[in-house]
Image (cartoon, rainbow, N blue to C red):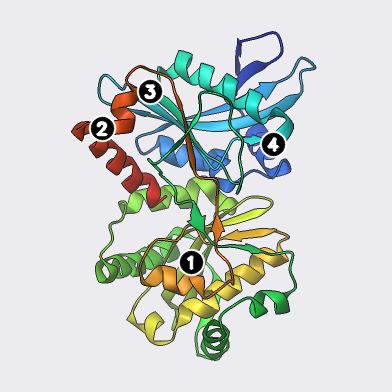
Amino acid sequence: MLFAMTYNEYMKLLECHDRQDWDDYVVEHGGHPLQLSGWGDVKTAHGWTAHRIFLYDTGEQVVGAAQILVRHLPWPLRSLSYVPRGPVVDELNGEETLTELAKYAKYKYHSVALTIEPDSKEYTVPKHWRQSSNTILPARTIILDLTKAESDLLGDMAKKTRQYIRKSGTEKFVIKRVNNRQELDKCLAVYHATSKRAGFGLHDDQYYSDVFDKMGDFSPVFAAYVDDQPIAFLWLAISADTAYELYGGMNEDGQNLRANYALKWYAILKCREWGLKRYDFGGLLDGGIATFKKGWATDETMLAGTFDRPLSVSYIIWNRGLPFAKAVIRRIKALLGRH
């Protein structure tokens, strides 16, 4: 079923309800895994509503696509429309796509703003858009070029990282893909231990089960095992070109064996073997995890960041942050910052 809305004589918006059609387009046009239907389904099950929008030209050809996540906000803000790591559109049609999506979000969802966080280092937005400091996903990250030779990837690492990869690779643990919910539950037990040790919060287990079920083959989980028990795990979301780290953790045995080094290298090589071109570490925040990530590449990557198109006179409340609006922002960052 398609819902059509036309805003000018040049472009037409259609809401797509066919998950296969949507995913085929995202995959074929180099879209980010957070633009896949499975990710939208996860968010829809946990407080958001996903809407998948195709933009057509006059020749009835799709020239852009955006999975918009809509979240209800307190009055007078009404809702926020958010496009994580999108839209999926070429440079030629980028500004037109954003203009039409903003009109759509205002008319259909009565949103205070349309917020986008593109998957690119540079991004041009139309007039009336603005850079926002209310970020959701971190712009600062590390992205490996998987088209490089294996030796070049190793050469870009810190010496200590290469040493730990070699050393941990000789330890007596086995790395394999997690293929069922029973094994996933064991990994989540490791994640709870990691959370307690490192002092960060988690979603409830049902959320992670939904990611596993709804993302399917687009979200592989790898784990290092000792005596059939996971000691470390790494969870990705993938599309045709991009691997994106979602979650990871290890218990004390994993720490002692530095299993996270061999495990991450295994995942990187597996993505390279599958033909993916980019491996995104999922953001850099201050602390020990960032220090670990920095050892894998010579340079950091700074994505374009967060852009807002104000759609309501209440945007000034959202942007400047009255106390309740700031609380909403923190809540959204907590939910989406942990993916």
Q: Which amino acid does label 1 sit on?
A: Leu
User: In the shown orientation, is residue 29 left or right of residue 74?
Assistant: right
Q: Do the residues labelled 1 and 3 touch (CB within 8 Å)?
A: no
Residue sitting at x 50%, y 90%: 172
Dot in front, 4 or 2: 2
- Identify the secondary structure beneath mark 1: strand
Of labels 1 and 3, earlier in sequence is 3
Residue to which mark 2 is pinned: 325
Q: Which amino acid does label 2 sit on?
A: Ala
Image spot of residue 71 (x, y percent): 37, 30
Query: Where is 295 relative to 138, above or below?
Result: below
Residue sitting at x 36%, y 39%: 46
Residue to which mark 4 is pinned: 25
Of labels 4 and 3, earlier in sequence is 4
Q: Are marks 1 and 2 in contact (CB under 8 Å)?
A: no
Can the viewer see residue 249 in this picture?
no
Q: Which amino acid does label 4 sit on?
A: Tyr
Separation (CA) of disc 4 from disc 2: 35 Å
Q: Do the residues labelled 4 and 3 touch (CB within 8 Å)?
A: no
Separation (CA) of disc 1 from disc 4: 27 Å
Separation (CA) of disc 4 from disc 3: 29 Å
Separation (CA) of disc 1 from disc 2: 34 Å
Residue sitting at x 51%, y 65%: 178
Image spot of residue 186 (x, y percent): 38, 67
- Identify the secondary structure beneath mark 4: helix
Q: What residue type is labelled 3?
A: Val
Separation (CA) of disc 1 from disc 3: 36 Å
Image spot of residue 306 (x, y percent): 47, 40
Dot in front, 4 or 3: 3
